[in-house]
Amino acid sequence: MLIDEIEITLKAGHGGAGKVSFYPGQKSGPDGGNGGKGGNIYAIVTSDITALNQFSRKTVLEAENGQSGRSNRQFGSDGEDLVILFPIGTTLVDSKNREEIELDNLDAKVLLCKGGLGGRGNAALASSRNTTPLRAQTGLPGQERKFIAVLKLIADFGLIGLPSSGKSSLLNELTSTKVKTAEYPFTTLEPNLGVINKKIMADVPGLIEGASTGKGLGINFLKHIEKVKILLHCIVSNSTDLKRDYEVVRGEMEKYNPELLKKEEIILLTKSDLADLGKLKEDEALFRKMGKKVFPISIYDWGSLKKLKESLNLT
């Protein structure tokens, strides 16, 4: 199961305590060392879209604390930094101040929480006024932040449409992935990705009328087309009412986020091998009048797939 939204708590390391110590014998004087700095917490961006699954059992992560100072002016070791992998396309929303951190650049390293400074030992606290301090600093706590991590897939193309409109089959054929397909609704329960000619294609679970009110799989997956460049709207070509099929999906998109309707959209009349040729031509004309690019397509017709790939610059 793909986790695409989760609440997490991150705690950077606490600074180590300074040491109260004195040189023995004739040497005398304070020799307590400083404590080490607490570890920072960093995000590293990965292409693994399942990276949020690591939080399914553990939602509180802590970096290592700094070690305490030692005698003979020896400093405590710094705490080890904690590096957490997040899938590309993740937005971290700070629960307190609502700051958003977008992780959209692969392999980027982003500081999320700063470790606390180590406390000074009594050697560092000595002064002309107090040559033998009997105290040391305890060290400062590390930064703690609570985030809501929301994954929105970043893809060049997003396959959308009603359930059983041929999206997964098309993804398999174009990208050589092996997504489960079947002739019944909701075979696809989570987004799937494929790669073709270094371009990423996402298959988003189907929408039904009323998805915005929770019917079917709801609209939870529509977040995954917010960062997609081009929408490939799949409509079964032998449907009794293609225009209504189109409007159902568009209507649910508008209820979720009207900005989605501004994205470039290409109509794919899928399973064209099952359609009446005359009706198929009429349906093409219908969408062309709406200013849309239209491609009748079938996974059993290599010519139609080739034409689509050429139009999308995927050859």
Image (spheres, grey):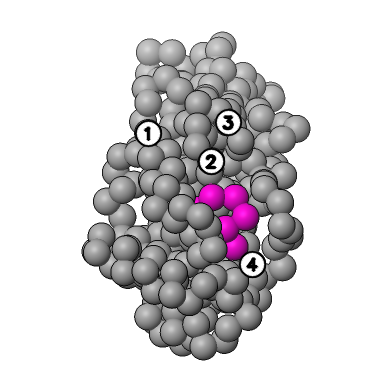
SS for dot 1: helix
Magenta range = 159-166
Residue count near mark 2 (Cα–Cα under 10 Å), binned few <14, some 14–19, many ≥20: many
Query: Would you name the residue on which mark 2 appears?
Result: 208
Point out the tag, 1 or 2, that comes first from the N-terminus.
2
Distance of mark 4 from mark 3, alpha carbons?
24 Å
| Mark 1 vs 2: CB contact within 8 A | no
SS for dot 2: loop
Distance of mark 1 from mark 4, alpha carbons?
28 Å
SS for dot 4: helix
x and y percentages locating residue 112 in the rendered image: 47, 38
Point out the tag, 3 or 2, that comes first from the N-terminus.
2
Residue count near mark 4 (Cα–Cα under 10 Å), binned few <14, some 14–19, many ≥20: many
Q: Amino acid at mark 4?
A: Ser
Residue at horizontal 27 percent and vertical 51 percent from the top: 262
Q: Amino acid at mark 3?
A: Lys
- The front one of 206 and 43 is 206
Q: Main secondary structure of the magenta part?
A: loop
Query: Would you name the residue on which mark 3 appears?
Result: 215
| Mark 3 vs 2: CB contact within 8 A | yes
Q: Amino acid at mark 1?
A: Lys
Q: Is residue 90 left or right of residue 191?
A: left
Q: Is residue 28 left or right of residue 181?
A: left
- Image quadrant assignment for residue 275: bottom right
Query: Would you name the residue on which mark 4 appears?
Result: 169
